[in-house]
Image: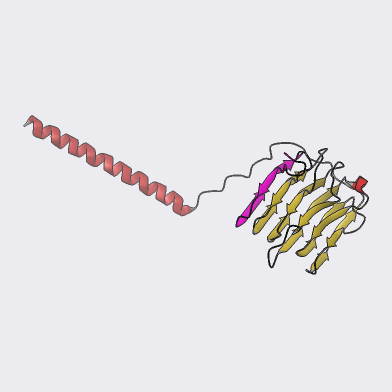
Amino acid sequence: MRAGFDHNIYVGAVTKFTLTNSYVHDVLDQGNEVKSRAQTTIITGNRIQDNSSVTSYAIDLSNGGSALVQNNVIQKGANSVQDAVVDCGAEGAYAGSQLTFTGNTVINDGTHLGNPTLMYTWCATTVSANQLFGLSNLGVVKVSTASLTASGNQMQPLVSAPALDTSSPVTPLAAPEPPAYTLMLISLLATVVMHQRRLRLRRSRRSLRCKAA
């Protein structure tokens, strides 16, 4: 693989991509942890961490789209070659692209690059209620004329950052209870199967009686 092309997750121009409750980490050879060209991208409740790998972006939304990045722990490693954690729309944003980046914990260990930046965005962007460690300011570079709304973000020194959780695998979400109509259908099918068995048994007995006569 060429440097920068070996991504942990690469999603093409599909309708929708959802990533949740996952640990994505240690991408190789200057790749992105998550790269998506989907029209809609939802990234929630994950740990996305470079750790000590030589990486590019943690999240690269190459063509923007409708994107939600919420309640994740995102760590930019000290060996990253990019000064931004997130990119949105750098390779040509879809019309009407918008990014909501909210409730995340971002830890920037890539301070060696000299310009610690949260994101480059070509999309209408909302950045709210994030905990940002290792960024001297909000660190959003708005490259296009698209709107930027920022509120409730807390900038803190890198030394205050929480310890990274590198355990794997992530505890899976509990399986949802089947809906009531599914249980009713299972019960109905079981009743039908039992009825068919009884009919076959009766027919078999009648056939034996006829042969005996």
Residue in the image at 91% along x and 48% along y:
113
> Which residue is at the front of the view, 17 or 55?
55
Closer to us: 11 or 178: 11
Q: Residue at x 14, y 35 (%)?
A: 207
- For this view, does 135 lie left or right of residue 30? right
Q: Can you give x and y, in whole percent of width and height, for residue 131 in the image? A: 84, 54
Q: Position of residue 112 (x, y in %)?
A: 92, 45
**Looking at the image, which is closer to me, 85 or 158?**
85
The quarter of the rendered structure image containing the N terminus is top right
Determine if the magenta segment contains residue 173: no
Picture coordinates of residue 165, whole percent (x, y): 78, 40
In the image, taking residue 140 as reference, residue 16 lies left or right, namely: left
Residue 24 appears anywhere in the view: yes
In the image, residue 108 sits, relative to residue 90, either above or below, namely above
Instruction: Look at the image and tell me in which quarter the C terminus lies.
Output: top left
3 sits to left or right of 18: right
In-front residue for pair 75/110: 110
Q: Which residues are magenta?
A: 1-27
In the image, farthest residue toward the front: 2
When the figure is inspected, residue 11 is found, relative to residue 88, above or below; the finding is: above
Q: x%, y% of residue 188?
A: 36, 49
Q: Is residue 147 above or below residue 65?
A: below
> Which residue is rendered at x = 74% and y = 57% of the image?
91
Q: Is residue 24 magenta?
A: yes
